[in-house]
Image: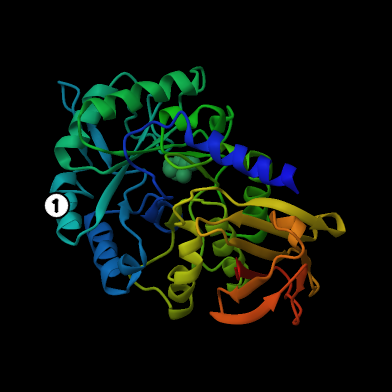
Amino acid sequence: MMKIAATLLATIALATVNALDNGLALTPQMGWSSWNFYACNINESVIMNTAKAMVSNGMADAGYTYVNIDDCWAGGRYPNGTVYADPTNFPNGIKYVADYIHSLGLKIGIYTDAGTETCQKRVGSYGYEANDAQTYAEWGIDYVKEDWCYATLENPQQRYQIMSQALNATGRPMFFSLCDWGYENPWTFGMSVGNSWRTTPDIKDNWDSMLSNLMAQAPITSFSGIGGFNDPDMMMVGNGGMSNTEYVSHFSLWSLLNAPLIAGCDLIDIDQETLSILTASEVIAINQDPLGVQGSLVKSYNGGLQQIWAKPLSNGARAVVLFNTDTNPATIELLWGNIWMEPSQQLSIRNLWTQTNLGTFTESYESDSLIPPHGCIMLTLTPTN
Ligand code: GLA
């Protein structure tokens, strides 16, 4: 047990050194991005109406802050190299959109690429990093995602470092989100260069894709911490390709894993069920816990069909997701040894989705109802003394 506690402490210590130190990402970023729902079909009214919706539907109050314009906003470069917005989709330019988003109390993100072109063949930042960083700062940008298309011969650590330094040199704090899809183990260098780094290929709006991106996190949980987070990609919650049971699992696990909570659905016409998933306050609180330690896979049963993921919290409690990936309902037994606790420890258990207290337990807990196929139970377990 002492060994388990020591491993936990070592993980916490490792995660807090070597941070980029731009003062950002004290907790995982929360917001929305245009890509998963709109892809290239964006324009200024989509972005501005989404920002407005994020305030009026309660998501801003729940913690969502960044409104991120993904690929397809860039129009080209002037002869002096300065980038400009697509004049058809963003006729008033990006600063106009930024000013509006700021007037709502939100922050704006933008997208670029470390190569010569973006994935949708708009201009990339290769060789123009200082110029682009300066332009973003002048527009009032708060967040930059840098993709990796048309950059394949470059070393990502070195290339991303150029934009990282250019952003810092502007004096404007800009969250820096790396996106090399996990190709070059960005978790090994991401903390010193950026505030989050994609760890996987693009998520698709289906169960297998979500599960595959999730499982890719299991071996790398220790690389994330305050200042920089593993990013298994933006969320698909609300886009219709999974059931709400599956979206609840997706959201629970992204929260527990300190993943960026970047919504990727239509916020202008959002349904109530999707909104209640995205604004589940006790689940979000796990993601935003100030200790900043990513949850990890602590136990698997039946070849991984049932899984326990757990995360230590700043108040000494543990957050746990009991996850049933099977197509049949199941129960899952949680032992205190799975979550770095002595068996004799009394733990008070709360269900974070139903927001109910389940009682006080020692040694172990097994849910009294079956966990549905592809479903989960999310709990906190808090020492009573
Ligand atoms: C890549 C990224 C996606 C998105 C698209 C835009 O595929 O991984 O997140 O930004 O490019 O073209």
- Residue at the image point whose x is 40% and y is 50% from the top: 29
* Residue 286 located left or right of residue 253: left
Name the residue nearer the viewer: 194 or 1.
Answer: 1
Residue 243 in the image: state x and y as whole percent.
61, 72
Per the image, the residue denoted by label 1 is 99
Find the residue positioned furthest to the front: 385
Please indicate, yes or no, whether residue 298 appears anywhere in the rendered image: yes
The crowding category of the residue bearing disc 1, from other C-alpha atoms within 10 Å (few below 14, some 14 to 19, many at least 20), is some
Residue 273 in the image: state x and y as whole percent.
48, 78
Residue 120 in the image: state x and y as whole percent.
41, 39
Please indicate, yes or no, whether residue 148 appears anywhere in the rendered image: no
Name the residue nearer the viewer: 267 or 194.
Answer: 194
Q: Is mark 1 within 8 Å of ligand 1?
A: no
- Residue at the image point whose x is 39% and y is 55% from the top: 30
- Residue at the image point whose x is 42% and y is 50% from the top: 27
Per the image, label 1 sits on a secondary structure element best described as helix
Residue 62 in the image: state x and y as whole percent.
36, 67
Q: Height in image: 10 above or below 203?
A: above
Name the residue nearer the viewer: 183 or 379.
Answer: 379
* Number of marks drawn: 1
* Residue 374 located left or right of residue 286: right
How is the protein colored in the picture?
rainbow
If the image is split into quadrants, where does the C terminus sit? bottom right
Mark 1 residue type: Asp
Q: Height in image: 272 above or below 54?
A: below
- Residue at the image point whose x is 24% and y is 57% from the top: 106
